[in-house]
């Protein structure tokens, strides 16, 4: 089932489920919203301005006519006609004048003259109640505007003036604005569609590259890199991916080298054991003295295998970053214990041990781990020294650090080998290391252990002359950080 899902992912994401499609849809929705606003708001604003202007104009005209007609107590048909004959009527505007009951006394229309009928328009009703009324609307290709005002005489409503305008010219202007907006919208839609496709491809290009790179790395191509372009988050993600693959490649190379070296280290004693056992089994006339010698050699090789296995297990625990218990540890006391234990070894090797162990050099760590670090450094200084040589062990405090320094007067480490001596299975002199029972893992274990507790180990030549100087430095225990 998992394999099927993986094959489906490798085939690629369907377009309508892809990030590119989501980007494109988002942009198109934004463009559509803008176009909707652009095609409605300006038209509504222009329409509102035209309607307001026309209503105001008709209301003013109606007020002028009403003011002219309000010179007498009553309105008559003849009087209204005489007064209207003296006024200049606006072209395209129909004028109706009614009495107080709504009876039409005057109608400027020659085609549909309604003199003698009652005006049942809403605006006239409002005007006869003493209020101005106006209304404008667009219908059937024309702007239709209506306005009505009362004719007042000493507070009495004598009648109403009603004006109606039918305007197609400004309606055509509004239609042309709407048509232009639609044309512009079409152009914008086409341009936006092209830009959306280009932008969505541009924005998802790095994502596609990164996805392809992840697949390459998943297949084991740790040297595959993504070319980062720009300074945006995707470029930062590409840089982080490249750094991750750098680390994966380094880790994989170290793993392969470690497996190869471990196999080689295990193979050597196993081959020796096999050779010695074959020599005993195939030679029937071998004497007991030779058998004992061979068995002793087999035991030494078995011990070597045991040391290698223990060191490998220690490295595995360090790599697993298992949580360790910590407590206040006095570095000078631990170093003194190690020196006391290794003194017989130093005497056997004719190496002099000197110590200078300051007090109040405490740190927070696991005591067994610190013991292991000190043991590895001091034991190496003794094993790789020479008869009549000297090993100096110094514990001191430097500000907020405590340090263990181990200096020997042995053959020393060539300067070009100093950066490599902490690598796993690395030996400066392989023949001498094996003769001394070394596995090439002690310094690596010591440094990794020190780093677990916030410290580090450095190596360099003996400042006083021949030999090597190792220094393990740790954060000192702060006050109040005791138990």
Image (tube, grey):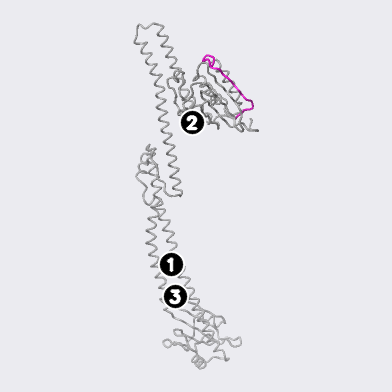
- Quick one: 483 or 364, which is closer to the camera? 364
- Quick one: 234 or 105, which is closer to the camera? 234
Q: Is residue 131 magenta?
A: no
Look at the image and tell me in which quarter the C terminus lies: top right
User: In which quadrant of the rendered view does residue 277 lie?
Assistant: top left
Residue 130 on image: x %, y %: 57, 82
Crowdedness near tag 2: few (<14), some (14–19) or many (≥20) residues, C-alpha within 10 Å: few
Q: Secondary structure at mark 2?
A: loop
What residue does disc 3 label? 138
Residue 264 on image: x %, y %: 39, 23
Start-end of magenta stretch: 345-363
- Quick one: 459 or 360, which is closer to the camera? 459
Closest to the camera, between mark 3 and mark 1, is 1
- Earlier sequence position, callout 3 versus callout 1: 1
Q: Secondary structure at mark 1?
A: helix
Q: Residue at x 36, y 13 (%)?
A: 278
User: In which quadrant of the rendered view does residue 111 lie?
Assistant: bottom left
Q: Is residue 346 above or below residue 9?
A: above
What residue does disc 2 label? 320
User: Disc 3 vs disc 2: Cβ atoms closer than 8 Å?
Assistant: no
- Earlier sequence position, callout 3 versus callout 2: 3
- Earlier sequence position, callout 2 versus callout 1: 1
Q: Which mark is residue 184?
A: none
- Quick one: 79 or 349, which is closer to the camera? 349
What residue does disc 1 label? 39
């Amino acid at each position: 089932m998992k394999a099927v899902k993986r094959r489906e992912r490798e085939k690629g994401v369907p377009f309508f489920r892809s990030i590119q499609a989501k980007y494109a849809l988002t942009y198109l929705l934004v463009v559509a919203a803008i176009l909707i606003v652009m095609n409605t708001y300006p038209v509504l604003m222009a329409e509102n301005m035209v309607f307001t202007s026309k209503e105001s104009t008709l209301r003013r005209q109606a007020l002028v006519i009403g003011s002219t007609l309000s010179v007498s107590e009553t309105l008559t048909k003849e009087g209204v006609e005489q007064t209207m004959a003296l006024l200049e009527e606006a072209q395209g505007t129909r004028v109706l004048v009614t009495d107080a009951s709504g009876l039409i006394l005057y109608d400027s229309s020659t085609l549909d003259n309604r003199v003698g009928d009652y005006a049942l328009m809403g605006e006239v009703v409002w005007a006869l109640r003493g209020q101005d009324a106006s209304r404008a609307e667009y219908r059937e290709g024309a702007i239709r505007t209506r306005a009505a005002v009362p004719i007042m005489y000493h507070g009495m409503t004598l009648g109403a003036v009603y004006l109606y305008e039918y305007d197609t010219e400004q309606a055509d202007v509004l239609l042309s604005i709407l048509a232009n907006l639609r044309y512009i919208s079409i152009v914008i839609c086409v341009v936006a569609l092209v830009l959306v496709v280009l932008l969505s491809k541009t924005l998802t290009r790095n994502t596609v590259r990164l996805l392809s790179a992840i697949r390459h790395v998943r297949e084991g191509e740790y040297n595959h890199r993504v070319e980062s372009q720009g300074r945006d988050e995707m470029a930062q993600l590409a840089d982080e991916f490249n750094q991750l693959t750098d680390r994966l490649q380094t880790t994989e190379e170290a793993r392969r080298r470690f497996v190869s070296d471990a196999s080689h280290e295990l193979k050597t004693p196993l081959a020796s054991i096999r050779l010695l056992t074959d020599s005993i089994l195939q030679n029937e006339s071998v004497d007991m003295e030779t058998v004992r010698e061979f068995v002793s050699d087999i035991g030494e090789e078995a011990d070597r295998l045991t040391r290698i296995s223990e060191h490998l297990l220690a490295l595995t625990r360090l790599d697993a970053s298992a949580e360790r218990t910590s407590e206040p540890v006095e570095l000078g006391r631990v170093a003194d214990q190690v020196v006391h234990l290794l003194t017989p070894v130093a005497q056997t090797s004719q190496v002099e041990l000197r110590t200078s162990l300051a007090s109040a050099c405490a740190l927070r760590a696991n005591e067994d781990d610190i013991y292991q670090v000190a043991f590895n450094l001091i034991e190496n200084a003794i094993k790789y020294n020479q008869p009549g040589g000297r090993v100096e062990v110094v514990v001191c405090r430097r500000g907020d650090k405590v340090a263990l320094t181990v200096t020997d007067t042995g053959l020393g480490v060539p300067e070009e080998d100093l950066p490599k001596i902490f690598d796993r299975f690395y030996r400066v002199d392989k023949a001498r290391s094996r003769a001394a029972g070394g596995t090439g893992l002690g310094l690596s274990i010591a440094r990794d252990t020190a780093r677990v507790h916030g410290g580090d180990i450095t190596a360099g030549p003996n400042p006083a002359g021949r030999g090597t100087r190792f220094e393990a430095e740790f954060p000192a225990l702060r006050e109040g950080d005791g138990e």
